Image (cartoon, rainbow, N blue to C red):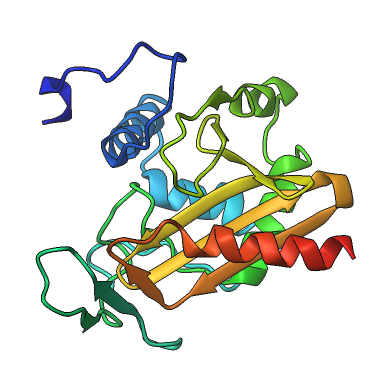
C-alpha cells in the first residue's frame, strides 16, 4: 500500500512521521538478516543486540502470537473528536503490545527506568560499532511548525526537543491508552522519561508540555 502513495517531499528536505516507513524498516531488517544467513528476525535481533546487553530487564518485545501478562496500570483512550456530543473513555488495558509491529506505538512493553538506560547508552555512542552511525542518526531536519509540542527537529528515529533552556534528544510515543516521552539532556547529563496511562484523540502531546515543567525544576 505504502509504495503506491506519492512522496510528501524529497528525502532529507523535510520531516513527517510515518508508521508505514517503520513497518517497511522491519521488512528491510528481516531481509538483511536472511542475507547474512541468520534465522532470526528483527524482534529477536533487538533483544539480542540491545535489550540483553543493556540488561533492560523490564522490557519485552512480543510477537503477535505471544500473550502479554498484565502486570501494570490500566490504560485508557479518551475520544474527544468534534463529532462526539460528549467525551468517551475506552479501557484499552488488554490490547496486545505487538499490534503495531515495528511502527512505534505499543510495539515495545517497557519501563521508564529501561528507557532512561537505553537513551543514555544510545546518545553516548555505546550501541553502534561505528561512531558515524550515530552522527547520521543525529543529522536533523527542521520540522514544520504545526502548533503542537512535538520535536523541533527530527533525525533518523530521533527527535530534538527544545525544553526551556535545554535540548532533549529522544522520542514521544502514544497508542492504545498510553502517552510517553523518553530522552537524554546532554547539557546536564540527565535522562528523563515520562509515561501516562491515557491517550487523548486531540492531544498536543501532553507529556512534552509536562516535561517543560520538569526541566524548570532541573534548572533550579
**Which residue occupies 50% across, 37% down?**
157
Horizontally, is 219 left or right of 76 in the view? right
130 relative to 195, above or below: above
Residue 16: name its quadrant.
Answer: top left
38 relative to 192, above or below: above
Horizontally, is 98 left or right of 212 in the view? left
Looking at the figure, which quarter contains the N terminus?
top left
44 relative to 128, above or below: below
34 relative to 115, above or below: above
The residue nearer to you, when weighing 30 against 214, is 214
The residue nearer to you, when weighing 93 against 212, is 212
**Which residue occupies 44% across, 87% down?**
73
Residue 55 visible to an observer of this rendering:
no
Looking at the figure, which quarter contains the C terminus?
bottom right
Horizontally, is 199 left or right of 136 in the view? left
Q: Residue 100 location, x and y as percent?
A: 28, 55
**Which residue occupies 61% across, 70% down?**
112
Q: Residue 168 location, x and y as percent?
A: 69, 46
Q: Residue 197 location, x and y as percent?
A: 43, 78
Amino acid at each position: 500500500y505504502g509504495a503506491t502513495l506519492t512522496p510528501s517531499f524529497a528525502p532529507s528536505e523535510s520531516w513527517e512521521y510515518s508508521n508505514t516507513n517503520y513497518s517497511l524498516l522491519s521488512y528491510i531488517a528481516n531481509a538483511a538478516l536472511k542475507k547474512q544467513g541468520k534465522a532470526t528476525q528483527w524482534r529477536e535481533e533487538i533483544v539480542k543486540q540491545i535489550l540483553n546487553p543493556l540488561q533492560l530487564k523490564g522490557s519485552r518485545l512480543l510477537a503477535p502470537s505471544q500473550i502479554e501478562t498484565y502486570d501494570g496500570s490500566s490504560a485508557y483512550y479518551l475520544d474527544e473528536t468534534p463529532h462526539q456530543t460528549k467525551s468517551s473513555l475506552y479501557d484499552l488495558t488488554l490490547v496486545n503490545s505487538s499490534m503495531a509491529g515495528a511502527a512505534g506505538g505499543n510495539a515495545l512493553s517497557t519501563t521508564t527506568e529501561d528507557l532512561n538506560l537505553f537513551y543514555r547508552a544510545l546518545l553516548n555512542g555505546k550501541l553502534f560499532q561505528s561512531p558515524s552511525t550515530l552522527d547520521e542518526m543525529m543529522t536533523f531536519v527542521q520540522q514544520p511548525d504545526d502548533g503542537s509540542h512535538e520535536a523541533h527537529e527530527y533525525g533518523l528515529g530521533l527527535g530534538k526537543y527544545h525544553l526551556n533552556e535545554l535540548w532533549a534528544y529522544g522520542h514521544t510515543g502514544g497508542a492504545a491508552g498510553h502517552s510517553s516521552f523518553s530522552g537524554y539532556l546532554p547539557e546536564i547529563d540527565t535522562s528523563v522519561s515520562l509515561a501516562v496511562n491515557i491517550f487523548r484523540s486531540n492531544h498536543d502531546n501532553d507529556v512534552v508540555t509536562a516535561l517543560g515543567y520538569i526541566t524548570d525544576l532541573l534548572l533550579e
